[in-house]
Structure formats: C-alpha cells, structure tokens
C-alpha cells in the first residue's frame, strides 16, 4: 500500500536515517508531535515498507576486515536454475555483505569483506566453483569517498496529495 509522505513523515525519515537509535521522545520533539503520535507515524512508515529494520553500521576495518572488495561476477549460464544456484551460494558466504543483480557486461555486483588476501581468495574460489561464476573482476576499495547518505526524501506536493486522494 503506497502512502503519501507529508512534512512530518519526511522529517521522521530524515531523523531516523541520521540516527535510527534515537529515542522516540527525542523524535517527538523534532517533529512537534506527542510521543504516542510519533510512534504511530513510525509504525505506519514501517507497515508501508518505507522503513525497514534498524541496524547498526559496523566499521568493517575496525571489526577486523581491512579488505573491502567489489566483485563483478559474470555467470557461466544465464537461466533460472543458474541464477538460483548463484543466489543460494552467495547467501551462504558470510563474507559477501551485499549483492545485487545488475545490467551491463556483468551479472552481479557483490561487496566482499576479508581479513586478508588468503580469505579473499577462498571467497573467490567459492564464487567460481559453487556459485557458477565464469568470470570475476575484483575492485579493491582504497578509501571511502562518500559514506552512505540518507535518501533525499521530500513531502508530496499538495497537488500530488489531492490527486492521490481522488484516485483512491
């Protein structure tokens, strides 16, 4: 169910993207609502699928994973069974911290963390042997250029809200 975001929803989303662990009472002060009304707003955003579960952002390097590598994977075969096999294998490799199907010259983009080059090599071998990757291109991240930024959410314009209500 799609919902229309108003100014308060947008403020909540901005604040939660900055610090998802912020107490509800602080959020309520930021948006000018009671804590109960604020909690209801946050629940509505969760129920609509706009807000996912809150997670801590762990510094990989500080946690003992100094290597962060982007891996471009091209599958040997391009049928549904090959895609399922690749996904199942990737899901089982804890060093793969994110993965996306992509378009272009490659099939998937993976983010892999490793303690050292030997661990990275083991992950790459798993991707080739078990996941069915025919070609792997690795890009070693040297330094974070821009940290993950909040989405640039904006409230729906008045005309969009009216159109949404009339169309419902």
Image (spheres, rainbow, N blue to C red):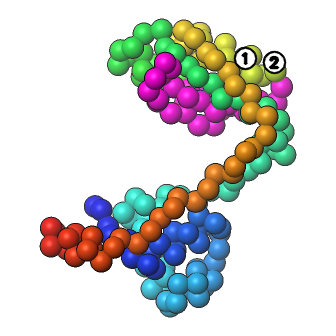
Secondary-structure class at tag 2: helix
For the residue pair 31 and 38, the one nearer the viewer reads as 31
Q: Which stretch appears magenta?
A: 90-116
- Where residue 123 sits, quadrant-wise, is top right
Residue 31 is marked as none
Decide whether residue 95 is among the magenta residues. Answer: yes
Name the residue tied to disc 1. 122
**Mark 2 closeness class: few <14, some 14–19, many ≥20 residues within 10 Å:** few
What separation in Å lies between label 1 and label 2 (alpha carbons)? Answer: 6 Å
User: Are the residues tagged 1 and 2 within 8 Å (C-beta)?
Assistant: yes
Q: Position of residue 100 (x, y in %)?
A: 50, 33
Residue under the point 58% across and 80% down = 27
Horizontal side, residue 67 vs residue 28: left or right:
right
Decide whether residue 104 is among the magenta residues. Answer: yes
Residue under the point 65% across and 67% down = 19
Residue 166 vertical placement versus 127 (above, below): below
Q: Position of residue 106 (x, y in %)?
A: 50, 20
- Where residue 141 sits, quadrant-wise, is top right
Image quarter in which the C terminus is found: bottom left
For the residue pair 99 and 152, the one nearer the viewer reads as 152
Residue 65 in view here: no
Name the residue tied to disc 2. 118
Residue 40 vertical placement versus 142 (above, below): below
For the residue pair 127 and 154, the one nearer the viewer reads as 154
- Where residue 91 sits, quadrant-wise, is top right
Secondary-structure class at tag 1: helix
Residue under the point 48% across and 8% down = 76
Horizontal side, residue 114 vs residue 55: left or right:
right
Q: Position of residue 157 (x, y in %)?
A: 33, 73
Q: Position of residue 41 (x, y in %)?
A: 43, 77
Residue 129 vertical placement versus 47 (above, below): above
């Amino acid at each position: 169910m799609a919902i229309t975001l108003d100014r308060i929803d947008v403020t909540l989303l901005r604040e939660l993207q900055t610090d998802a662990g912020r107490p509800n009472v602080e959020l309520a002060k930021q948006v000018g609502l009671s804590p109960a009304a604020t909690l209801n707003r946050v629940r509505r955003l969760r129920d609509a699928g706009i807000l996912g579960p809150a997670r801590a952002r762990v510094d990989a390097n500080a946690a003992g994973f100094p290597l962060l590598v982007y891996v471009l994977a091209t599958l040997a075969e391009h049928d549904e069974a090959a895609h399922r096999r690749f996904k199942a294998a990737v899901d089982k490799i804890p060093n793969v911290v994110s993965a996306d199907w992509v378009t272009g010259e490659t099939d998937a983009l993976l983010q892999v963390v490793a303690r050292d080059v030997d661990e990275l090599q083991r992950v790459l071998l798993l991707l080739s042997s078990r996941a069915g990757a025919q070609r792997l291109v690795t890009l070693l991240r040297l330094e974070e250029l821009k940290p993950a930024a909040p989405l640039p959410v904006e409230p729906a314009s008045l005309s969009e809200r009216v159109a949404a209500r009339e169309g419902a």
